[in-house]
């Protein structure tokens, strides 16, 4: 099985990175702990990643451009590199550079990032996604934090080093649930953790999906109104984020009660039926 065989090959120059780290990482796979997501802060908008590596003496495994294009700098994640500060943070982690200077990830970048991460998890047989936590930043602290986090951990550069990278760009709130679901789908028996969708409801929710990666949730709100929230893979929860407010679809003359029923018969079509407080049933539908 290959690793990112679909990506653009852009081999890292041979003369960069902590070369003395090659041996332990290659021999001892248990040192391969996770990945560090970096922000490339705009350098690659006018040049290419391998040129930057050559100029800076650094190296990392993958660069994901704002266009969604993925550069693969080594044929597999080798954990032989220098992407984040001192040796400890480079033993057991490989780096992923996200193009852009403080900008949010583009939808194309998010799609590619998920693809890269899912494939990397599969390649190693990692079965859990753990978000690392900032360390006290001595080399020993970092080493201990990496070992404690276990396989498949995700980090950002400034968890280890005093740096502006990735400048608050990493959308962990979106990425971790996406990735946890992806890992679960892989055939392991693991469920995600609970995540709060916020809001305040009278009854139980109803769910429907009109397409792969799409989920719609309906629930009756405190004033008897129909509330709606939806999830689209690659875009996260709408209309206002996972814990943000729900779309208010109102109610007919009388307030609604109970649990709505929701169903989809086709791509872009949604039907909801719900009872009002007098027991009359109402139907509302959406068609894209
Ligand atoms: Zn960085």
Image: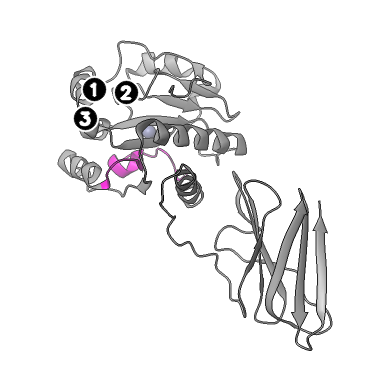
Q: Which residue is mark 2?
A: 78
Residue bounds of the magenta highlight: 149-169
Which residue lies at the image location 84% right of the left edge and 83% below the top edge?
A: 253
Q: Earlier in the sequence, mark 3 or mark 1?
A: 1
Residue 76 percent across, percent down from the top left: 38, 21
Q: Are marks 2 and 1 in contact (CB under 8 Å)?
A: yes
Q: Nearer the viewer, residue 3 or 8?
A: 3
Mark 1, residue position? 26
Report which quarter residue 164 is drawn in.
top left
Closer to us: 186 or 87: 186
Q: Position of residue 170 (x, y in %)?
A: 46, 43
What is the spatial separation of the Cα atoms under label 2 and label 1, in whole angstroms?
Answer: 7 Å
Residue at 40 percent across and 37 percent down: it is 165
Which marked residue is nearer to the observer: mark 3 or mark 2?
2
Q: Is residue 3 above or below residue 98?
A: above
Q: Is residue 100 above or below residue 5?
A: below
Find residue 87 and name its label. Answer: 3
Q: How is the image coloured?
A: one colour
Comparing 245 with 84, the one in front is 245
- Cβ of mark 1 under 8 Å from ligand 1: the answer is no
Marking on residue 257: none
Give the secondary structure at mark 3: helix
């Amino acid at each position: 099985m290959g690793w990112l065989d679909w990506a653009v090959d852009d081999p890292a120059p041979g003369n960069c990175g902590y070369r003395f780290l090659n041996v332990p990482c290659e021999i001892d796979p248990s040192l391969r702990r996770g990945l560090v997501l970096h922000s490339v802060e705009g350098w690659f908008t006018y040049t290419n990643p391998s040129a930057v590596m050559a100029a800076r003496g650094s190296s990392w495994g993958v660069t994901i451009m704002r266009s969604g294009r993925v550069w693969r700098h080594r044929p597999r994640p080798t954990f032989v590199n220098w992407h984040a500060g001192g040796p400890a943070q480079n033993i057991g982690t490989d780096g992923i550079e996200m193009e852009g200077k403080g900008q949010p990830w583009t939808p194309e970048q998010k799609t590619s990032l998920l693809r890269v991460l899912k494939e990397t998890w599969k390649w190693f047989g990692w079965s859990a996604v753990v978000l690392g936590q900032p360390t006290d930043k001595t080399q020993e602290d970092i080493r201990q934090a990496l070992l404690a986090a276990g396989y498949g951990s995700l980090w950002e550069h400034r968890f280890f080093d005093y740096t502006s990278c990735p400048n608050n760009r990493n959308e962990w709130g979106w990425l971790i649930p996406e990735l946890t679901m992806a890992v679960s789908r892989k055939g392991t028996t693991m469920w995600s953790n609970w995540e709060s969708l916020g809001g305040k409801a009278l009854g139980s929710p109803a769910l429907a999906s009109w397409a792969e990666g799409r989920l719609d949730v309906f629930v009756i709100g405190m004033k008897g109104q129909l509330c709606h929230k939806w999830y689209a893979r690659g875009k996260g929860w709408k209309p206002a984020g996972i814990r943000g407010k729900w779309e208010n679809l109102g109610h007919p003359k009388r307030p609604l009660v109970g649990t709505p029923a929701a169903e989809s018969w086709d791509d872009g079509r949604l039907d909801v039926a719900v009872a009002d407080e007098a027991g009359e049933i109402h139907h509302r539908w959406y068609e894209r």
